[in-house]
Image (spheres, helix red, strand yellow):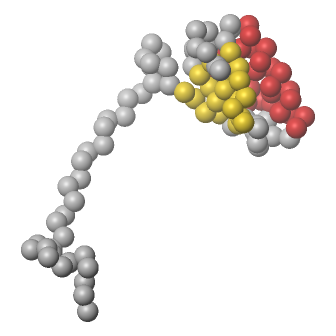
Amino acid sequence: MFDFFRSGRADTKRRPREEEPLPERRPYAKGNSSPMQIRRPRSFADVEEIIDRFKDGLTVIVYLNEVNAETSARVIDILSGAIYALNGGMAELQKDMLIFTPDGVDAR
């Protein structure tokens, strides 16, 4: 039987794969480049933490697929008011997925 992958190769032994160390994790500190935060509120109470990220100047993607329609509407109302007060922007990426950007970042 013809072995397609081994024909014509002088070395048929597999060489061990060299492992490269992973880069060291750096904790987030204000003043670094603005990372994007992803939040999935499960209740209206989770909104305060999302607004804190706005106040830190971070871009936040919010998924609203884990709350009912009434709570989703309330969350959007509060977050849009907060981002407006902070001169930020808001855009819908897809159904139940919004992006909120700080002042100076275009959300379009």
Left or right: 17 as drawn, with respect to 51 = left
* Quadrant in which residue 100 is drawn: top right
List the single residue furthest toward the bottom: 1
| As drawn, 30 above or below 11 | above
Q: Residue at x 22, y 59 (%)?
A: 17
Q: Residue at x 54, y 27 (%)?
A: 36
Looking at the picture, how far across and down is residue 83, in whole percent? 71, 14
* Quadrant in which residue 94 is drawn: top right
Left or right: 71 as drawn, with respect to 85 = right
Nearer the observer, 13 or 42 = 13
Looking at the picture, how far across and down is residue 11, in whole percent? 11, 72
Q: Residue at x 74, y 14 (%)?
A: 82
Residue 55 seen:
no
List the single residue furthest toward the right: 70
List the single residue furthest toward the left: 10
* Quadrant in which residue 27 is drawn: top left
Left or right: 65 as drawn, with respect to 29 = right
Nearer the observer, 64 or 53 = 64
Q: Residue at x 65, y 20 (%)?
A: 108
Nearer the observer, 65 or 45 = 65
| As drawn, 58 above or below 17 | above
Left or right: 102 as drawn, with respect to 7 = right
Count of numbered circles in the view: 0
Q: Quadrant of the N terminus?
A: bottom left
Looking at the picture, how far across and down is residue 63, in whole percent? 70, 36
Residue 103 seen:
yes
